[in-house]
Structure formats: structure tokens, C-alpha cells
Image (tube, grey):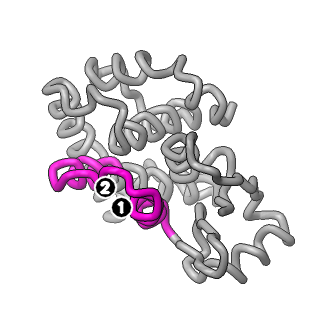
């Protein structure tokens, strides 16, 4: 099995951390390099990373890759409440990736425009909800939603996209897991 993604992608990193004990080869890509872009186009019609290739099977999305690996290796699936936590994490991640790509395209995301306002509102609302869930102990165990939350928080810090310091439980969670071996070996810095 091969996982294709970039070392800076929070979506690829979450799978790399989750699959640390699964025989999975990571293929680092630069999706802006012509050869890697052509491979991405050939393998994944969504043109997103990560994607997983297992023999003839190609899986296109980190959330689906997680489900595929969970089923293939008979691991415990996440619960419905954990699915909701993952949706909160993914909504922030998706909004921030969009804003990040727009800023990389020299589009000012601080302007007062519907798209940017909706993304900022989504991020703030979901961050407050994650803070409540984190404070309530729903991320105490190192499970897939916790891994995804860590990857989001670390990516936000790495890219300097959002100040998490006002969220004490989330900041403590991020700090607590920075010395994990799987976190260190996948650090994009």
C-alpha cells in the first residue's frame, strides 16, 4: 500500500500518524511539480491529496482512507459522536485550506466579502465547539479524531493561520502531544 501526499498536508499527516503501525509506504509529492501533478491527475480525479493506492484500489480522501484502513485491518471504527468531532475538525481544515490557497494566489482574505466572512464564521464557531469538547475530555484518548485535531492545530500554528491561544483546552491538548514519536516523525517543519 502506498499513501501519496505532501509532508505539509494536515490530511496526509493524520493518515501517516494513524497508520504508524500499518505497513504503508508514504510517497511525498509536490503537487505543483509537473511530474507529481500529472501523477495526481492520473490517480485522483478530485485533484486532492492524500490518496491511497492498494493494489488496483485507489482511495481518494483522508476520511475514506481512514475507513478503508479501519475495515481492512479490522480496527475499531469511530463512534457517531466521534464522527461529529471529526466533522468539526474537517470544516475548519477545509475553510483554512481554502483561505490559505487564496492568500497564496494574492487574494486578500481579510476583505469584507461573503465567502471570507462565511469561512471565518465557520472557523470561529467550530473552534469554540471543539474547545468545549476538548475541555469535556472527548479528546483525552489518542484516537483518530484526536490525531486529526492535533494535525489541524499544528498546521494552523505551522502556517500561522489562526491564533489558538485564546482556547486554553485546545492549546494544552496541542502542547501535550507535541513530543509523541509519531508526531515528531511527521512534523512538516
Tell me, yes or no, whether the highlighted magenta stretch contains residue 87.
Answer: yes
Q: What element carries label 1?
A: loop
In the displayed structure, does residue 37 sit left or right of residue 18?
Answer: right
Magenta span: predominant SS is helix
**The magenta segment:** 61-89
Query: Total label count?
Result: 2
Q: Does the magenta stretch include residue 161?
A: no
x and y, in percent, of residue 156 in the image: 48, 37
- Quadrant of res 138: top left
Side of 178 where 126 appears, left or right: left
Name the residue nearer the viewer: 137 or 46.
137
Nearer to us: label 1 or label 2: 2
Q: Residue at horizontal 73%, vertical 64%?
A: 31
* In the image, farthest residue toward the right: 35
In the figure, is residue 150 to the left or right of 38? Answer: left
Q: Where is residue 49 in the image (x, y as percent from the top left)?
A: 60, 63
Residue at the image point whose x is 27% and y is 31% from the top? 139
- In the picture, the disc for residue 117 is 2
Q: Mark 1 — residue?
A: 113
Mark 2 lies on a secondary structure that is: helix
Tag 1 and tag 2, C-beta contact below 8 Å: yes
- Relative to 20, is 81 above or below? below
Image: 185 above or below 51? above
Amino acid at each position: 500500500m502506498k499513501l501519496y501526499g505532501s509532508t505539509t498536508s494536515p490530511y496526509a499527516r493524520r493518515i501517516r500518524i494513524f497508520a504508524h503501525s500499518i505497513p504503508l509506504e508514504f510517497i511525498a509529492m509536490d503537487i505543483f511539480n509537473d511530474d507529481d501533478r500529472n501523477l495526481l491527475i492520473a490517480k485522483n480525479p478530485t485533484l486532492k491529496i492524500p490518496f491511497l493506492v492498494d493494489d488496483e484500489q485507489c482511495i481518494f480522501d483522508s476520511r475514506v482512507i481512514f475507513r478503508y484502513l479501519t475495515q481492512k485491518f479490522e480496527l475499531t471504527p469511530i463512534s457517531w459522536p466521534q464522527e461529529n468531532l471529526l466533522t468539526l475538525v474537517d470544516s475548519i481544515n477545509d475553510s483554512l485550506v481554502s483561505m490559505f490557497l487564496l492568500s497564496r494566489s494574492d487574494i486578500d482574505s481579510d476583505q469584507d466579502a461573503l465567502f471570507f466572512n462565511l469561512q471565518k464564521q465557520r472557523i470561529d464557531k467550530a473552534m469554540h465547539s471543539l474547545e468545549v469538547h476538548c475541555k469535556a475530555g472527548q479528546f483525552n484518548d489518542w484516537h483518530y479524531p484526536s490525531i486529526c485535531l492535533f494535525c489541524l492545530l499544528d498546521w494552523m500554528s505551522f502556517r500561522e493561520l489562526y491564533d489558538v491561544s485564546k482556547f486554553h483546552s485546545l492549546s494544552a491538548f496541542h502542547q501535550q502531544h507535541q513530543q509523541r514519536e509519531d508526531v515528531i516523525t511527521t512534523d512538516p517543519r
